[in-house]
Image (cartoon, helix red, strand yellow):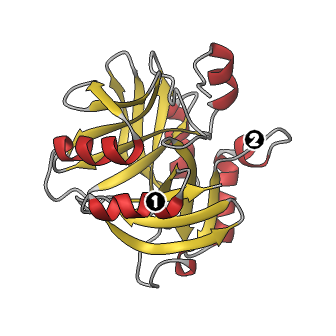
Amino acid sequence: MAENSASAHEAAYREGVPCWVDAQLPDVEAGKRFYGELFGWSFEEAYGSSVWARLDDGLVASLAPKTDGRMPTVWTVSFAASDAVALARRITAAGGQVVMAPFPVGDLGVAALATDPGGAVFGLWQAGTHTGFGRRHEPGTFVWAELYTRDTSAANAFYGGLFHDALFGAEAEPDFGRADVTDVFPAEMPPHFVTHFGVTDLDDALGTVRRLGGRVQAPPFETSYGRVAVVTDNQGASFALLRR
């Protein structure tokens, strides 16, 4: 179901709700081929040299070229911010770091990049004309963000302090979980977020990932929010496939 109405956006993207995901890739054209076949996305030009990914009538993600080869090839989840500058100050006060101070992205909105005290990277998005996901919670779209951390209690305290209503409020339906990094990854893996996209058949989707040149990092496992497999695309960006 598409979520294009103003009321849907207002309800969905209050502060602290995951509202957008973007991939930084060495080769955007290769990314378009990979994700277009895997999820059925189409693409159109966006801001600068990035492209929007669209599923039917709704925007679902963006792909952008890495501006520096030393940058990681990653998917980044961004949380909605009512005031990115004020939220960046709160992140710093809570022990996180602001990696990229809030900056305007044309009239689309204001973006920032930060890390939590454990070093996991996440984005902030203060909406302008771009409010965030036009579709989510369905196959081929964002369905969940999982933070793999070495200290789930500290993560709950940090994010709960920043985004209490979105995570723990009376009407909260969070798309954001926290787990010990060693539940899925080797102990030496640094804390990080994994963006989850929905699929209708996990085994079929894994076959498509392999056929397109990606690989399986973590084979299917059961979670409280569905059956998950962690994969990388054909350029090394990690993400998860989720069947609910």
Does residue 133 sit above or below 32 in this rendering?
Answer: above
Specify the label residue 204 is tagged with.
Answer: 1
Q: Position of residue 233 (x, y in %)?
A: 30, 58
State which quadrant residue 5 falls in: top right
Q: Position of residue 34 (x, y in %)?
A: 28, 49
Q: Is residue 242 left or right of residue 98?
A: right
Q: Position of residue 119 (x, y in %)?
A: 44, 64
Of 110 and 91, nearer the camera is: 110
Image quadrant holding the C terminus, namely bottom right
Disc 2 residue type (three-letter): Asp
Q: Is residue 107 left or right of residue 220?
A: left
Q: Is residue 118 left or right of residue 65?
A: right
Determine crowd level at label 1: few under 14, some 14-19, many 20+ residues with C-alpha closer than 10 A: few
Residue 56 shows in the view: yes
Does residue 159 sit above or below 192 in this rendering?
Answer: above
Give the spatial CA distance, label 1 vs label 2.
37 Å
User: Which residue is denoted by mark 2 in the rendering?
Assistant: 165
Q: Secondary structure at mark 1?
A: helix
Q: Secondary structure at mark 2?
A: helix
